[in-house]
Amino acid sequence: MTAPARPIAAVSLDADNQWSYMKTHGDAGWESFPSYLDVLMPYTCDLFDELGIRITYFIVGQDAALPVNRNALALVTARGHEVGNHSFKHEPWLHRYSRAEIKDELSRAEQAIGEACGVRPVGFRGPGFSLSTDVLETLADRGYTYDGSTLPTWIGPLARAYYFRQAKLTAEQREERSMLFGRFSEGLQPNGPYRWRLPSGRTLLELPVSTIPALKTPFHLSYLIYLARFSDALLDAYLTVAIEACRRLDTPPSFLLHPLDVLGGDQVPALRFFPGMDLDAARKREIFLHVLGRLRDAFELLPMNEYARRLNARTDLPVRRAAA
């Protein structure tokens, strides 16, 4: 007797580099583009080989444009993973850009990522979950298959308050970052995949970064690592609730990873201000393999393009109208 098919889920990693964290935080020295990509890319590719899965890396165009990063980024597609567009300058105030600025931002990133990785991206995730109707329309103009920039949770302002308390920002910089991680009302957004209905009349598939259905609290790996600092049992209980809620409510999750989910404070001391960076790389590796292993047992884990292809074939996805 054939076993029932597992529900699908996507896994992606936003390849935010050291300089982009420093830039958003207001730290001096980011302009020299300090990088850990030469460590991150082979290390994570080895971890995904160990787990037997393939994912999507959302690449920042500025990193792809620098020759020093080309070998590290080329490794991603050489090892069988996908790449997506994570903007060129990685500015979480992308929603403030004009339509012309958005076009330039996307096209510059596409060109640089294509040259570094050999593939033009067809999916996008905004830095800091930054999104606007103009971004969506520009993605449709450029033939993108999906957007993955929404995070439907109510805790965004709390995360922003913590970030501002730790940051060294001028009043102007705080204003730029005033929507970092979104409003409380983001918790009203759909948790599962849907289609945007754009003012132009076109549609675009939206693949939200998943939160726990109904609760709308995050369960991406950064959040789980934070819980693990208190108790492994707490992490496991929380992850069990998230998995069961997604399965029972037919919500195919899109699970998000960040570089600092695998790199420890011992490896990148300049980013010790970030939550979870008091853990070393060995402890994070242990958590990473445990969590991804549990997800692999519960779902068929896919990179974003295949996840999008299967969801686009469905006729029952809800439609949400983008603001005019």
Image: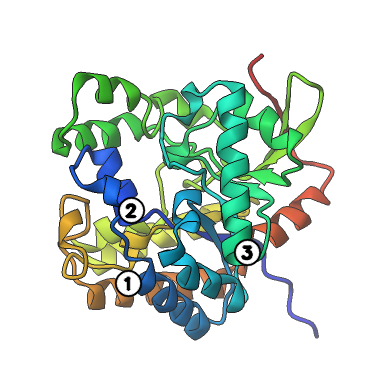
Residue at coordinates 55% horizontally, 37% vertically from top-left? 105
Horizontal and vertical percent position of residue 159 = 28, 37
Q: Which mark is residue 223?
A: 2
Residue 229: in sight, yes or no? yes
Q: Which mark is residue 303?
A: 3
On screen, residue 299 versus residue 31, left or right, reads right
Residue 294: in sight, yes or no? no
Residue type of the residue flagged with mark 2: Tyr
Residue type of the residue flagged with mark 1: Ile
In which quarter of the view is residue 235 placed? bottom left
Horizontal and vertical percent position of residue 322 = 66, 22
On screen, residue 92 versus residue 268, left or right, reads right
Residue at coordinates 39% horizontally, 25% vertically from top-left? 184
Give the mark nearest the N terminus, 2 or 1.
2
Of residues 220 and 198, the one nearer the viewer is 198
How many angstroms separate mark 3 from mark 2 (CA)?
21 Å
Q: Quadrant of the N terminus?
A: bottom right
Q: Residues within 10 Å of mark 3 (few under 14, many from 20)?
A: many
Residue type of the residue flagged with mark 3: Pro
Of residues 28 and 16, the one nearer the viewer is 28
| Above or below: residue 178 compared with residue 276 | above
Give the mark nearest the N terminus, 3 or 2.
2
Dots 1, 3 in contact, CB < 8 A: no
- Residue located beneath label 1 in the image: 287
Tag in front: 1 or 3: 3
How many angstroms separate mark 2 from mark 1 (CA)?
12 Å
